[in-house]
Image (spheres, rainbow, N blue to C red):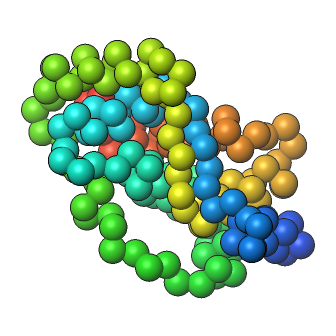
């Protein structure tokens, strides 16, 4: 595995664009497959948050796929508040066919395929990757990371 050398100037710019006063701490993702899983849990888990669950799945996947970038951003931003993971990562039991059909129906609409992830770390890592990788867009890369994270956690729904 090759070790990436972190470009400090681009890291600082990505973090400033994310956590600065005018920065966006959010990534909006368009993903039919990812949202199918998130909508399923929205139908089966009371008070479920797609955005928080998507952020957790992306954080977990970024730690695996981009560990150097994740560590550099985390070190630069500082410690996270944490504490949400247990509540927002439900276990997959027996699949509820009605909820799965409802999720399938929801992702057939454009709005049903969008989720906003509010996570300064995820946003900063994604912006850094965009700045350092030619021809990478945040939306496509974010969708792939979200889908990989959800597929790893819930293979029965993919």
Image quarter (top left, top right, bottom left or bottom right) of the N terminus: bottom right
Query: Residue 134: x and y, percent?
Result: 87, 43
The answer to whether residue 39 is above or below residue 18 is above
Query: Residue 102: x and y, percent?
Result: 27, 20
78 or 148, which is in the foreground?
A: 78
Rendered residue at 33%/67% (across/down): 84
Find residue 35 and report its image quarter.
Answer: top left
Query: Residue 26: x and y, percent?
Result: 61, 55
Rendered residue at 40%/75% (across/down): 82
Rendered residue at 34%/50% (across/down): 49
Query: Residue 77: x and y, percent?
Result: 64, 80
Find residue 121 and report its image quarter.
Answer: bottom right
Residue 142 showing in the rendered view: yes
Total numbered badges shown on the rendered structure: 0
Q: Is residue 121 left or right of residue 37?
A: right
Judged from this view, the residue extending furthest toward the left is: 94
146 or 46, which is in the foreground?
A: 46
Residue 61 showing in the rendered view: no
Q: Is residue 36 left or right of residue 135?
A: left
Rendered residue at 55%/62% (across/down): 119
48 or 85, which is in the foreground?
A: 48
The answer to whether residue 91 is above or below residue 137 is below
Image quarter (top left, top right, bottom left or bottom right) of the C terminus: top left
């Amino acid at each position: 595995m090759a070790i990436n050398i972190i470009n400090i100037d681009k890291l600082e710019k990505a973090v400033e664009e994310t956590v600065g006063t005018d920065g966006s701490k959010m990534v909006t993702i368009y993903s039919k497959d990812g949202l199918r899983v998130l909508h399923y849990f929205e139908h089966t888990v009371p008070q479920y948050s797609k955005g928080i669950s998507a952020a957790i799945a992306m954080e977990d996947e970024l730690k695996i796929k981009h560990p150097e970038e994740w560590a550099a951003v985390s070190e630069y931003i500082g410690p996270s508040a944490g504490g949400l993971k247990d509540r927002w990562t439900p276990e997959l039991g027996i699949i509820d066919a009605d909820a799965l059909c409802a999720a399938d129906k929801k992702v057939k609409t454009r709005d049903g395929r969008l989720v906003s992830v509010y996570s300064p770390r995820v946003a900063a890592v994604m912006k850094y990757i965009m700045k350092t990788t030619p021809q990478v867009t945040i939306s496509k890369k974010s969708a792939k990371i979200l889908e990989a994270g959800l597929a790893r956690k819930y293979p029965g729904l993919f």
